[in-house]
Amino acid sequence: MSVRFAVLGAGRIGQVHARAIHGDREASLVAVADAMAPAADALATEYGAQVRTIDAIASADDIDAVVICTPTDMHADLIEQFAHAGKAIFCEKPIDLDVARVRACLATVESTQATLMVAFQRRFDPDFMALKERIEAGVIGDVEMVVLTSRDPAPPPIDYIKRSGGIFRDMAIHDLDVARWLLGEPVATVQAAASVMVDPAIGDAGDFDTANVIMTTASGRQATINNSRRAGYGYDQRIEVFGSKGMVSALNTHESRTVVATRDGYTQPPLQDFFMSRYERAYANEIAAFVQCVKHGAIANPSGNDGLQALILADASLQSIKEQRVIHVDCD
């Protein structure tokens, strides 16, 4: 059985997911919807799909699942529409920028018993998955500290900053999810600091471009996240997990693995400089996992609740900055 997909939103991330669906032997892309007709036509033509409206996709008998890649303010409404339509749902993060709206949406998902997976692709990066496996195998003992570094090569356009929900809901939310995933325990407290160090226009837009978050669990496990919107040397993505018996880390990915050694020292190619190339395999892996979830009726992971918890931590980070204090959170 091939899982038959529709992609809602033919922009950059929609193209990434369409490519992943096309590359999966157990999936097929049947339809594309986008408010911009040329974008929908181009994507549908590339993969032999049809252009349809969202309502037509919801009522279609030849669609099993949808991938939601529309603007954020449409996510929750579309999740609810397709939950009622009986389709499996894969949705880009976040579900919404408002926690109350996310809770209401997830209540609909639960009442309709819909399948919902939230797109936190970093959990599917091969190196990060291998790191997680070492932790679960007990190689480093009990987790005590998680350190996440996530720095973009350059800031996005200011227009994007203004509608993104801010650095914590837009950028750090990936790291907040990975931290929860690696800590293995619910987060109890959040403390954050943030500045404008890269571009004053980001501050004028009401956001930050440089941030740190410290989280603790009830047992004392800690996670530290550092984010920057500017890393002149490339896309900086690293993880270190320290445990009672040792440490495991995942290092950066370079443009190639070639290393040159001379009397002057060691040199290697630059880091990859774009998230879509850095996480290309992760995007394919998460679609493959979703396909298997749909085929076998498995519980989606990351779930809608994972999306909710990451948003709660993002909001707590912003609250910590505004109130200059440690924020106690109720996470699961």
Image (cartoon, grey):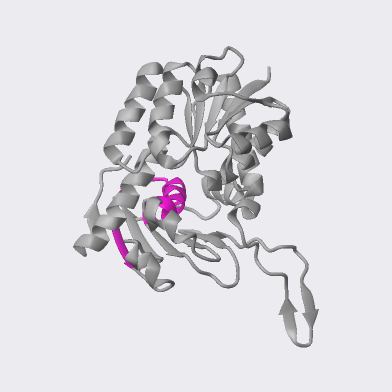
Asked if 241 appears above or below 259 in the picture, the reply is above
Q: How many marks?
A: 0
Q: Position of residue 150 (x, y in %)?
A: 50, 61
Q: Indicate the quadrant containing the N terminus: top left, top right, bottom left or bottom right.
A: top right
Chain part drawn in magenta: 168-194
Asked if 252 appears above or below 15 in the picture, the reply is below
Q: Is residue 169 magenta?
A: yes
Name the residue at the top extreme: 61
Depth order, front residue of 96/311: 96
Q: Indicate the quadrant containing the C terminus: top left, top right, bottom left or bottom right.
A: top left
Answer whether residue 10 is visible to the viewer in this image: yes
Q: Is residue 48 magenta?
A: no
Answer whether residue 143 is visible to the viewer in this image: no
Q: Position of residue 236 (x, y in %)?
A: 56, 64
Judge from the rendering whether residue 323 lies leftward or rightward of residue 218; answer left or right.
left
Q: Position of residue 84 (x, y in %)?
A: 42, 17
The residue sitting at 63% across, 40% down in the picture is: 15
The residue sitting at 58% across, 12% down in the picture is: 61
Location of residue 203 by image quarter: bottom left
The residue sitting at 45% across, 58% down in the picture is: 244
Location of residue 11 by image quarter: top right
Judge from the rendering whether residue 163 lies leftward or rightward of residue 15; answer left or right.
left
Asked if 20 appears above or below 3 in the picture, the reply is below
